[in-house]
Amino acid sequence: MTENHPGQVLVRGASLLGERSADLLLTDGVISEISSEPGSLSAPGARVVDADGLVALPGLVDLHTHLREPGREDAETVLTGSRAAAVGGFTAVLAMANTSPVTDTAEAAERVHDLGRAAGLVDVQPVGAVTKALAGEELAELGLMARSRARVRVFSDDGRCVANPRVMRRALEYVKAFGGVVSQHSQDPDLAGPQSCCHEGELSGRLGLPGWPGVAEEVIVARDVMLARHTGSRVHVAHASTAGTVEVLRWAKSQGIAVTAEVTPHHLLLTTDLLTGYDPTYKVNPPLRPAEDVEALRAALADGTIDAVATDHAPHARHDKEHAFVDAAFGMLGLETALSVVASVMVEPGLMGWSDLARVMSTTPAAIAGLEGQGRGLEVGAPANLTLVDPSASHTVDRAASVSLSRNNPWHGRTFGAAVQATFLRGRPTVLDGVLV
Ligand SMILES: NC(=O)N[C@@H](CC(=O)O)C(=O)O
Ligand SMILES: [Zn+2]
Ligand SMILES: [Zn+2]
């Protein structure tokens, strides 16, 4: 018998990780009961969500989101980005530090944290800058950010590479003290010069666009895994994009070096030949790569060499994106579509199951970021952060229907087979029937 409870939600007949059907009762923010006989749980007064045919996953966790607040509230705010995250099935996002001002102090981190709590749709966990103002020279207030109310554990100068190896070494030594991690935007600034805006190869020559070669990423990844080994600290490779990076990661992991890596949905599906139309929607850092790299990234995600998927959701206002290719801003939207893209690339062709998807989009990212209460299994007593996915909801992406403030959506007009139906943050529905509650 279950007592009547005003805040209860009964999720009926969901397929847990795509494996066994069950009813889930969510009470006071936790999963309070699971019955493997669908239809058998009853909870008078509970809100009933019919999940027949839906796959239940732990709430998704994004290691790499740009929310643009403070400074560029015309492109995204913590609230609008949180909406996009919830619609995408996320219950936690890590908000990158390249805002204006930069998140390089405890106060700045607490501000982002508090804006996230006020929005109340996902846990917004600020990423702290590695260096003051992302300038690459002086370490930011790493310890103060870690000890602040925001409890920062992930540090990144994302958008810029921590190019100086001495600075990177010091940062790794510092974050080790509190179990932190440095997430590196691996782009050697001399090998990929300031004008570089697409993959360097035969196509960049033909298009007359300054290219950036895969090796500009690989040399930084190789350097950083050696620094991680030397310091005994943890390094995380943001948005891995090349087969060479995968080779370095494979070697580093075989040596027991504490390196983790993420790949974006767009690097798992889109290739550099999309650039033939000079559409700045496809301009992103690191650039879209050739099919061989995309293949290697998929294989690496399937075999665990790459640990996680992260969106690198990078909203940009029209007046920054709608320019000649060389002048347009780098970045594309990702939160609302990530699950659909990863399901189409990895699950539908049989490269991964739903439990693997849960690992790379929830459990492992939560562990890398040290987030408590996120990425837990679907078990009694776990915080009720979960996502319901319709695995056969064929739908076509319409950029105008996005809840993000920006429209730089590379998936516009594409059809996908799976879609997020519902998201619950500590037992409270944030999204039902695919729309914000
Ligand atoms: N990915 C991008 O192309 N752009 C990001 C920065 C980054 O992730 O490097 C942005 O802030 O717009
Ligand atoms: Zn980056
Ligand atoms: Zn980024």
Image (cartoon, helix red, strand yellow):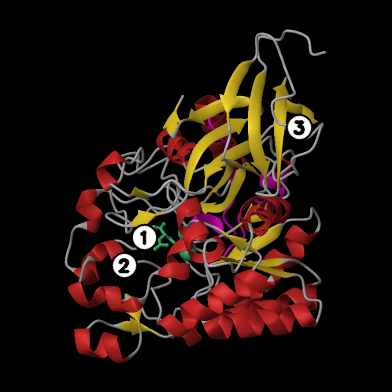
SS for dot 2: loop
Q: CB under 8 Å between callouts 2 and 3?
A: no
Q: Confirm or reject: label 1 Cβ below 8 Å from ligand 1.
A: yes
Residue in view at x 37 percent, y 42 percent = 71
Give the quadrant of residue 228. bottom right
SS for dot 3: loop
> Which mark is in front, 1 or 3?
3
Mark carried by residue 331: 1
Mark carried by residue 409: none
Q: Amino acid at mark 3?
A: Glu
Q: Earlier in the sequence, mark 2 or mark 1?
A: 2
Residue that badge 2 annotates:
283
Residue 109 against residue 213 in the figure, above or below: above
Q: CB under 8 Å between callouts 2 and 1?
A: yes
Q: Earlier in the sequence, mark 1 or mark 3?
A: 3
Label 2 crowd bin: few (<14), some (14–19), many (20+), radius 10 Å? many
Give the quadrant of residue 276. bottom left
Give the CA separation, mark 2 to mark 1: 6 Å
- Percent from the top left, x then y, of residue 408? 29, 53
Residue that badge 3 annotates:
37
